[in-house]
Structures are given as structure tokens and as C-alpha cells.
Amino acid sequence: MKALVFERRIVDDIKIAEYKDPEVRSHDVLIRVKNVGVSPVDYLTVTLLNVNPIPHIPGVEFAGVVEKVGEHVKSVKVGDKVTIFGSIFDGTCDMCMEGYETICRNGGRIGIETNGGMAELISLEEKYVFKLPEEYDWKVASSLPVSGLTAYHSLKEAKLHAGETLVVFGASGGTGQFLVQLGRKMGAKVIAVSRKNWLKELGADVVVGYENVEEVVKNYTNNKMADVVVNSLGSAFWEKGFSVLGNKGRLVTFGDITGAEVKLDLRRLYLSHQIIMGIFRGNRKDLLELMELCKECKIKVWKTFTLDEGRDAINSIYDKERDGKIILEVS
Ligand SMILES: [Zn+2]
């Protein structure tokens, strides 16, 4: 099979290579990869994270068609459209027993601690493979494992209720687009913080730039401010995010793209009964629920690349002109 591979920790080292087809053991599912979602995680996979094995095939979120199954596989069959659960878990630790496979004590990530989906084929244990309804759009399907799941798990953990106000920072990114749509589906009023007006087409009630967000949230909520704020942009936008959180508000973060260290006004936190929560992707049960919820979800795609153009795809992640998601079309 053909695969994107890197050995040295620079994006320019990524190249297409001929690889031995993956082995399919009795509990494994062989997937012919259709689409791969490309995100900052892929850039970090190449440049920074501890990956295994080396040379390494990146790709943390993808979807495809079942090509072959091992003799004990029951939940999917050849020809099924599938997406993946991307957190490696053992199923035996206390976190897994609670249904928190995403923070398994012996866990990891497909595409980082193992080879990923930027290849024509990948073989995974059945427990990581989920059958999708036939009508699923490929671009949405390949964005479910990380972008979609993180968004859904965030809103679920934050206990977003109908009628509440949700403020999404970085709303035009992969996860942001799902947050806007899922927030709306859950009955919340959604304020998208972004310069992209097309977010209204995804269900945002208001789209506002960073500089005016406080004033707009204040007016929109009649001084109550937001019930849930999702802000994964890191330290540069931390204060902005915290400033729009109201009484009993929940602030969710799952990223630190502009830095991980922030200042926190404890007085404001306790006087307003607020909660700050960290989220790392989501669990298998969340993925099942998300697949049902997201049948009509949309993804605004900025650019698509072929597998051969994988290096350009990863290089374009931090492009200033970027306007939506980046997708790798493998087959
Ligand atoms: Zn575990």
C-alpha cells in the first residue's frame, strides 16, 4: 500500500512510500481509508510528539470502508462505511471501567502511539471501529473521531441545557464547527467568536470578532453572560473567554495553541460559582451518541488534498488564509 511517512521531525521530511499491507489478525478490521481530517494535531505529530513507530504514518481522524475482517469480528462486515474511535485503551483500568476510555491509564492515540490513517489501508482492533449510517457525508465522517467527539464530549460534560447561552471561541476550526452545530441541536443559543460570517449557516445565532465579544455577550444575555464558554485557544485568549462567563458558568478547554500558562482571578471564580473543566477528546459511548446526533452535520471545507499532496496539507494547517477544515482524500 501507499502511505505518508516521516522519519525526521520536520514537515519537509514527509513523503509517500510503499509499505507492506497491514496484517489482519482474528479480532482486527482492515479499513480502506477514504478521507482523513487534517488538524494541528498532525503538525504536532510530525514535529513534536513522541511517536511510535519511526518511520511513522500520521493521521488521527479518518473514515473508510471495511476491506477485510478477522474471523472473530462481529460488529462490522466487508463493505461497511466506518469511522474510528481514536483513543487507545485497555478496557481493564478504573477509568475504562467508568467509561472514560479517553483517559485510560494505559492509553494512547491511534496515529501517534501507533501508525495512523494517512495510508491506503489500516488494520485496527474491532473495538476501535464503528459502523456509520450509509447516508453519512465522508467529510463529516472523517471529522468525527477528534473534532466531532471533542466538541460533543465538551458540551456533554459542561451539561449544556436548552435555552442556555454557549460562546464558542475559534468557531471556524474543525472542532468549533461541530460545537456550533451541536450547541444548536441541544437547544442552546450560540455565539460564535470568529471573523467568518458563514458560521450563521451552521446555526450560530451571532457571529462576533474577538474585540467586541464582551459587549455583544453582555447585550445578548441581558447582562447575565454565558452559561458555557468553550475556549481552546490558550493563554492569549484566556482572559477574553473568562470575562464572558456568567454565574454558574462552565468554561471548557481542550487546547493551548497560544500557550498553556494563564492567570486566574480566584475571587471571580468562587463569587460566581464557576467551573473550569479540561476535556481530552471523548469516550466510545459519546461517539455512538454523536453518530446519531450528527447525521445532518456539515463541515465547511477549505481545501482538499490527495494522499500524494499530504505534505502540502500538513503545511497549510497554520495558513493565515485558512477558511474551514482541511481534508485528505485518500481514495
Ligand atoms: Zn484503561
Image (cartoon, rainbow, N blue to C red):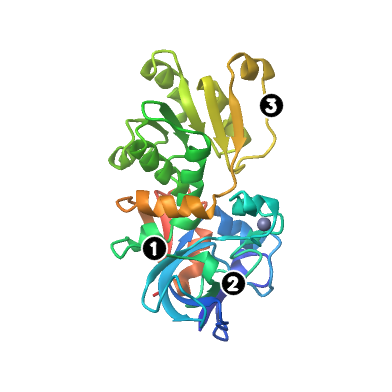
> Between residues 238 and 106, which one lies in front from this camera angle?
106
Q: Position of residue 21 (x, y in %)?
A: 54, 85
In the picture of the structure, the residue carrying the numbered disc 3 is 263
- Image location (x, y in percent) of residue 149: 48, 50
Instruction: Report the side of 57 relative to 172 (left or right).
Output: right
Give amino acid for label 1.
Answer: Thr
Q: Nearer the viewer, residue 71 or 87?
A: 71
The residue at which mark 1 appears reads as 304
Badge 1: few (under 14), some or many (20 or more) residues near its Cα, within 10 Å? some
**Residue type, numbered disc 3:** Lys
Ligand 1 within 8 Å of the CB at mark 1: no
Q: Secondary structure at mark 1?
A: strand
Can residue 180 be seen? yes
What residue is rendered at 49% in x and 57% in y? 145
In the rendered image, is residue 300 in sight? no
The mark that comes first in sequence, 2 or 1, is 2
